Image (cartoon, rainbow, N blue to C red):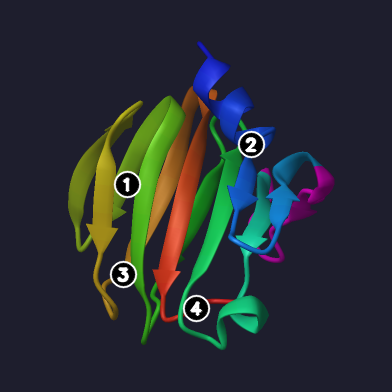
Amino acid sequence: MNNTTFFAFDNGSLRLPSSTVKFADIPWSKHPEFDGVELKHIVTAKETSGQFSYHLVRIAPDKKIGNHTHKTQLETHEVIAGSGVCIHDDAAISYDTGVISILPAGVPHEVTAGSEGLFLFAKFIPALC
C-alpha cells in the first residue's frame, strides 16, 4: 500500500489565521470500543462549540469499526489510503483511496479494513467529541 498521502496527513497541520496545529503533536488514541482502531482528534467539539469535529482514523488490517449509528451526526469519510468496505444501511460501499462517503444521521454503518489496513479522514456535523 502506498501510504504517502496518509503520511502527509499524519504529519500535516491545521492552519488558522491565529495559529497552526501540527498533527504530529496530536497523539493517537485507541478507539474505546473497537480493537485495532485508532483516532487522532484534529478538531474537537470543544474547539468548535460543538459545531463539527475532524479525526484521522487508522484501522489495522482486517479489523473493523463495528455496526453503530450516530443519532444526530452526519458523518463523512475520505479514504486517504488502503482499502476496505463500508456497510451503510445494508449496502456495501467499496473503500479505496480517493473515495468519499456520506453517512446521514440515524443510518447504521460499519467499516472493515482490507488486508493492508485503512486510513480515513472522518468529519462529524455536529461534533462527535
Q: Which label sits on residue 108?
A: 3
Asked which secondary structure carries label 3, the reply is loop
Kindly indicate whether the residue at mark 1 contacts the one at mark 4 (C-beta within 8 angstroms).
no
Task: Answer with mark 4 or mark 2, whichever residue precedes in sequence.
Answer: 2
Q: How would you classify the magenta stretch by its main secondary structure?
A: loop
Residue located beneath label 4 in the image: 127
Task: Name the residue nearer the viewer: 49 or 93.
Answer: 49
Is residue 47 visible in the rendered structure shown here? yes
Residue closest to the far left: 91
Asked which secondary structure carries label 2, the reply is loop
State whether residue 125 is above or below residue 119: below
State whether residue 6 is above or below residue 112: above
- Left or right of 33: which side holds 110? left
> Disc 2 marks which amino acid?
Gly
Count up the numbered dots. Answer: 4
Bin the neighbour count of mark 4 within 10 Å (Cα to Cα): few under 14, some 14-19, many 20 and up: many
Residue visible at 67% across and 64% down? 18
Residue located beneath label 1 in the image: 86
Q: Position of residue 126 (x, y in %)?
A: 42, 81
Bin the neighbour count of mark 3 within 10 Å (Cα to Cα): few under 14, some 14-19, many 20 and up: some
Residue closest to the far front: 17
